[in-house]
Image (tube, rainbow, N blue to C red):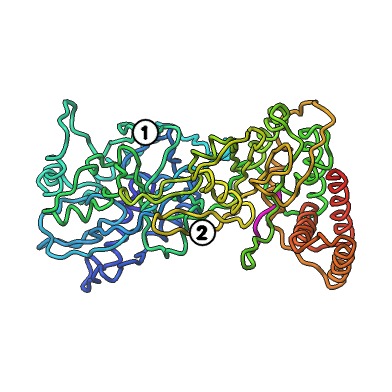
Amino acid sequence: MGGPPYDCMSNPLGAVRLTFEKAIGLGSETLTHPSAFDGKDWGALELFRHFLFQESGLSQVPILNPKTLRWVQHNCLVRYRGMIQDMLGNEFYVGAYREEGCSWRTNKFTDVSQYAMESPSDTCIWERRLLYCVPVPGQSSWTVLSCDMDPKWSSQSREKRRRMNDEDEVPMDLAPEDEVKRSPITKKMRENEPPASSEPMDLKTASMSTIQFVDKDNLPCLVKIYDSPESDLKLNDVFEFIGVLTFYSELAVEKDENDELSNILYDDARVHLPPNKVPRLHCLVHRKLAVHDFLLGSPIMEPKPHLVKEIREALFRHLTVVLGNDGVAAHFMLLHLLSKVHTRVDDVAVGKLSLNLTGLSKESVSVFGTRLSQAFKNLLPFTNCMPLTLEYLNTASLAPKKDYQTNRLIPGVLQLPEGSHLMVDETQLESGSLNSIGIDNVKLLKNLIEFQKVEYDFQYYKVEMAADVQLLIFSEGKSNIVPADLIVPFQPSSLESSEIPVGEALEAWRWYLATVRSLPHSIGSEMQKVVEDDLVAARQADRSLGSRDFSRWLTMARLISSSLGETSLTLEHWQMVKEMERLRKERLK
């Protein structure tokens, strides 16, 4: 029994074509009009999912990054991990067409028709969504997928595709060269080509190495989405996209107002993202990534309490050394690193726990700030730093802003994905005046730390976008610009440097921080009565306490329970909360 007449890796469009022909009933007595598949899958996605996840094909798919661009092939299957930085709307394209006397063909999952399109007698105009994706801001190096695939794969797959095309009566990949040259679209592309002395490019063997990207260390990607509800993909979400990589440098031409068909196919050129700067990926399969999906080498374990407690104790000792043997600060730091927004009640982001370490100077931040920054890069998937100087506040673009001239959302520093960590150094801030930009930036930071929201500027109106960012602030005194949930005076007693952990210990800590923060939590009826009585007593003893203080205590209680691998609050956990608050307040006196 022979194998499938296509190769999902090196010739994905061949698989798409054959599933399309099968779906419409090509060769049978009754044909289904392709319009029946507008916005629907005809079986291609099921085939690719089976190949990727049932036949373990995912590990064979090359990862699209600056290194693989040197050898990855046009029209092959690739995967790309990134954050959705901008949503560019929908693009119309000729999804299926038929010429007089010919059978139906499809242009799905490609920018240019695989066959010459002279004068179609019937066409189906479909839509696809355009997403501008970028590498995740602040992504730590240990989370980046390595591509161990030999570049020889590209030549082997190319040769395999040639053999398959030779054996097939009808080419799966491209129309004969003379037909392509005669088509109106190719003529338009040729007329707009700049003069060149080199040989014409063979699209069968074209690699992305011929593209001159603006930033080879920070590869963006224009992802084209098919047949997926809009609610599935949201701004700032982090996704892995698997699809067909296309390379047509000729798409960066100006639109011809008299060539309607060509403009439909090349409609994405209007978003000012020419292919010589941003590669195109036609998505077949996508999946949203959470923090734990970046644990490449960490073991998959159940968060059992005895195991979690051992890892917690080792991580706590490491944080204590990093923080100059300040155990109190290490306890609060651990809870801070486990915090996340679990839910929202009105304007309250339940679960956040920002931390302000005070008593720091420029000199001490250069020591402990550097240590913490390195520790976070080893432990967390997404880490960012912000030097809060007067000049920075008055000039930085913190909020994303819409540019209607290019129809692009210009990114801001605070456009961060869920699960990001942001370290703010306020020790460099000196006295001076804030301009209008500085005032707006201060408001943005306060809004983020208090409500976990960032205001996006669409010029004519503003939109608040939900965020989930852990904020750590260094300052000499209590920060007034970025008022945190917890203010902890920092009291190190040692300058002893900590060794950078390696191996299983480091992987266990990463797993711990990514996993236990999402454990469920409950408070039994008996403990609920204990907590209520303690809150009433605390309010009677100190009238300055308010709802924010009580909310913070409950958040700390949940985090302590989770940090120990427990899913319900116990009296021991609650006593730990009260003791930590007592030690913190002693330092504030």
User: Seen in the image, is 509 located left or right of residue 297?
Assistant: right
The quadrant in which the C terminus is found is top right
- The residue that appears at 33% across and 38% down in the rendered structure is 277
Q: Position of residue 138 (x, y in %)?
A: 55, 40
Quarter where residue 317 is shown: top right
Q: Is residue 306 magenta?
A: no
Label count reads 2
Residue 477, x across and y down, in percent: 74, 40
Taking depth in this image into account, of 196 and 537 the one nearest to the observer is 537
Q: Quadrant of the N terminus?
A: bottom left
Name the amino acid type tagged 2: Glu
Is 324 in front, or is 380?
Answer: 324
The answer to whether residue 62 shows anywhere in this view is yes
The amino acid sitting under disc 1 is Val
Crowd tier of the residue under label 2, counting other residues whose Cα lies within 10 Å: few below 14, some 14–19, many 20 or above: few
Q: Which range of residues does the magenta coloring cover? A: 338-342
How crowded pointer 1 is (Cα within 10 Å; few <14, some 14-19, many 20+) is rated as: few
**Numbered circle sitting on residue 44:** none
Instruction: Find residue 195 and report its image quarter.
Output: top left
Task: Estimate the x, y position of residue 77 in percent, counting from the top left.
Answer: 38, 46
Could you give the CA–CA distance between mark 2 and mark 1, rounded to whole angstroms?
A: 31 Å
**SS at mark 1 in the image:** loop
User: On screen, 269 above or below 534?
Assistant: above
For the question of whether residue 169 can be seen, the reply is no
Q: Is residue 270 left or right of residue 459?
A: left
Q: Relative to 486, is 167 on the left or the right?
A: left
Q: Residue at x 18, y 33 (%)?
A: 200
Residue at figure coordinates x 50%, y 49% from the top left: 56
Specify the principal SS of the magenta part: loop
Q: Position of residue 283 (x, y in %)?
A: 39, 53
Q: Which mark is residue 214?
A: 1
Please give the residue where the numbered disc 2 appears in the rendered image: 464
